[in-house]
Amino acid sequence: MDFLDSYHLWADAHHFYESPRLPGPRSDAGPLAELGDAWDSRLEETPNGGLLRDNALFDALGGSDRLYLLHVTHALEEINRNGVLYPSGGCLVGSIYCAPLSVAGSGFHMHNLGRYILTREAPAFTARMGVPGRTSTPLIFEVDAPSHAYRGLAGIDYLRLGIIHLQIYTHLEYLLSKTERHQLREGIVSRIKNSTAFLALASAVVHQSATTAPDRFLGVLHETIPRLPILGYLYFEALSEYVMLHSTSDATRRLADLGEMNNWLYKEMLFLSFPNMAGRFDLARFRPAPRDLDALLGRIDPTLNADHARAYLADRVSYLTAARLFTPGQVPEAWHRTRWEFDTLATQLGPLLGHLVHRELRSFGRYPDFYFYFDQHKALQAWNYWNHMDIVAPFNGTIPKGELGINPAYPDLRYKIWSARQDDDGRLHPIDELDLTIAPRLVDIKYTLMRNNRWTTETAPAA
């Protein structure tokens, strides 16, 4: 893949939050682009829709040449011993995962995302590790952006990475044997072939304005997620978006006054549904049963309406399926006539194939031994694009809820790092400046706070 091809793919994987919106063609051209514009307007008209364009995250990114960020680690001892901090993969591809901080008197105010991770999620994770004395530590980053750094708002949308995953696999597939490649391709084709009930339903809702009972749609979605695990991610993002944008609770209103989306809503939703997800952040397993939706929403926020949520989710997940999993410009039809071969499906469902390949490789044959290099290859492409754009601090553009990172490969990166403590009022204060280097090399996924399956007593790279 030459640079031009890679550049276009990565540009299309970003959401540009310009105001007013830039005119001209979009990557999802045609009727789907019009539907995308309609969705943008619909989201902005929700009770908290103003936060999509005017929020504390964007204020931090565009407010000055200096950023203050919170990163939470469970491996401070290893970090200090090695003197190196490594980025992790996930929704920010290859970044040091952080949340915004703002100056508050002699300390720093934590964005509610960071506060949840530090005070709720990280303690649950370290408790589950079962290692005596293991605690999580907040780190404060001071990052200076040079004058030529990009001042626009371009957020990476990991749901748009499917075609990139497929392209990378085509370059690295010969790490597998012929038999393994055949088994991988046939297994993925089988998954899609047995999921046409959902794919056809979502396509009909989007492209034919078909109507379906929300309970029926969510039921088919629930049945299909185990075969197409990327749907768990789409469902999670759609439901997270719904609860943050539609909540009218006092807590949500207080946070909105600060320019913050209420991240506690979807965090509580996730961990109430799947309590073991702390430290095992696997959204492929996110599939709350439709019958449990009323009770789940009632527990996290009584101001949410479950019937309204169902109708919203049926529409939104249908749109995300067509916009993120179908090849742009393609409208799969006549499913019974589909030629069920990998290369043929790549024409109409390339992004879906890419997401499935990326997921399957984690546990397929010998490829887990190479999976690190797959994600490292992806990170190199992301860093190359970010450096071309002069992006110092990439953020999760799926929805600007507060997740942002540090580009570890930025050539003019200037930063300081402190360990920190939290006072009785919830503010953070720097304690000791740390002599650490941010290295442009991914940490192994099993060592990261957000994705660790189990703690290992071996010396681990710090994340």
Image (tube, helix red, strand yellow):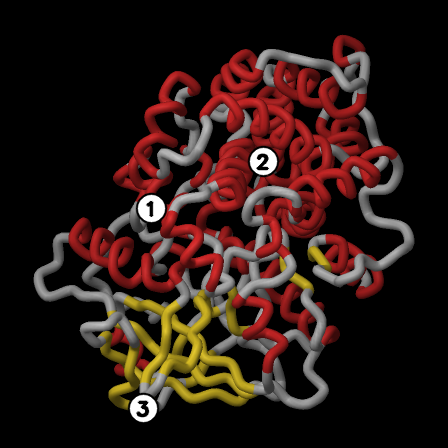
Which amino acid, mark 3?
Glu
Q: Residues within 10 Å of mark 2 (few under 14, many from 20)?
A: many
The Cα atoms of the two marked residues, 1 and 3, are separated by 30 Å
Q: In this picture, is 345 found above or below 420?
A: above
At 36% from the left edge and 55% from the top edge, which residue is drawn?
A: 450
Looking at the image, tell me whether mark 2 or mark 3 is earlier in sequence order.
2
- Under circle 3, the secondary element is strand
The Cα atoms of the two marked residues, 2 and 3, are separated by 43 Å
Q: In this picture, is 141 found above or below 345?
A: below
Q: Quadrant of residue 52?
A: bottom right
Is residue 360 in view?
no
At 54% from the left edge and 86% from the top edge, which residue is drawn?
A: 66
- Mark 1 or 3: in front is 3
Could you say which is closer to the camera, residue 339 or residue 231?
231
Which amino acid, mark 2?
Leu
Residue that badge 2 annotates: 356
Which amino acid, mark 1?
Arg
